[in-house]
Structures are given as structure tokens and as C-alpha cells.
Image (spheres, rainbow, N blue to C red):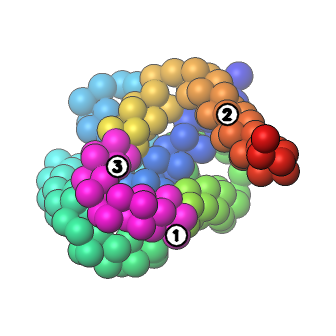
Amino acid sequence: MEALFGIMTAFGLSASAGLNAYIPLLVVGVIAHYTDWITLNPPYDTLANPWVLIVVGMLLIVEMLADKIPAVNHINDILQTGIRPAAGAIIFAASAHVLTNVHPVIAIICGLLVAGSVHVVKSAAIRPAVTATTGGTANIPVSIAEDVLATGVSFLSIVTPVLMIVILVIAIALIIWAFWRRAHRKRQPVS
């Protein structure tokens, strides 16, 4: 059961890294440093080092500010294209420590794929659509919502990984239902 929770935590944290690379790193580092909820194995225990936490915190502030400035946010997304999947790979491998039979390369690939997928959806589909439909006025609230979501997902992935997976399954089902409904509505003639 602990292995299953480890997998759920790893997937939740790497998905969070796809929205914001530094939030899950900071959440895991702070929780590992100040509590016994997470025990990071070497070399990932470096995330709990106070100096690393300070650097990640400063990078988080820079990333959050850049993501709130129109036009700069798109440049930031381009720059984050390599950083977010890498952070997802690191956090997946670090949080999946209970899986002793999984090769670290597989954990890194899973983290890259999950964080990279979330990042691509965010930066190539959602954010451009928000910018185009609102003239950029909704970018700041959407960015704040992404930061809150990344923080909540990171925390819930550690504290209650089962609840996080249930929420994720419900969210995916709602998205699929919305797309199905939209496609079905387009096929019906207007009366």
C-alpha cells in the first residue's frame, strides 16, 4: 500500500511541476526539512537543505513575477519548457523513494512525461487561448489560479495522495465530458 501511495504522490507532484517548476520542489523540501512526513533518500535529500530552499524560493518568486507580466509570461513559458519537465523528473524520482524495484531512469522518464504534458497543455493550449479570448486581461488571475492549484496539488499529493488521485480522475472525467458535450452540441442543427 505504501508503494501505491508513493506512486500517487510522485504523479501528483510531477503534474504540479508542469504548472510551476519550483512550487513542488519547495513544498517537498520544506516538508522534508521541518517534518517527518517525507524522508528523502540521497541525493534527493539535498532538496531539504536550507540553502537549496532559499535558492528555490528565490527562483519561485522570479518565476511567479514573470508569469504575471503580459508578454513576459509567454517568454517565461518558453524558458520553462526545459525546466518544468526536469523539475517533474527530479520530484518524481525523489518522491517515489518507496519503490525500490523501480529503476531511477524509469522514474525520471515518468516525471518528464507527466510534467512535460501538463506544461505543454498549459503553455501551448490554455494560456494562448486565455490571452486570445480576453486580450491578456485574464492572464494574471489565471496565473494566480495556476500557482494556487500547483500548491494545493503538491500539498495534497503528500498529505492525502488517494484524495489527490480521486480529484484527478474526477477532473479528467469532467474535461472529457465537456469536450464530448461540446462536440455533440456542434453536430446538432440550430433550431
The quadrant in which the N terminus is found is top right
Q: Is residue 163 magenta?
A: no
Identify whether 33 is placed above or below 123: above
Q: What percent of the width, then of the height, locates residue 110?
A: 66, 57
Locate residue 104 relative to residue 18 in the image: left or right.
right
What segment is highlighted magenta in the picture? 122-147
State the image quarter where residue 167 is shown: top right
Mark 2 or 1, nearer chain start: 1
Q: For mark 1, what is the residue?
A: 124
Residue drawn where x is 34% and y is 73% of the image? 74
The amino acid marked with disc number 2 is Leu
Give the vertical position of 138 relative to 62 (above or below): above
The span from disc 3 to disc 2 (Cα, nearest Å) is 19 Å
Residue identifier under label 2 = 174
Instruction: Assess whether mark 3 and mark 1 are in contact (beta carbons under 8 angstroms).
Output: no
- Check the image and report above or below for 174 versus 69: above
Q: Which mark is residue 142?
A: 3
The residue that appears at 38% across and 71% down in the rendered structure is 77
Q: Which mark is residue 181?
A: none
Q: CA distance from mark 2 to mark 1?
A: 21 Å
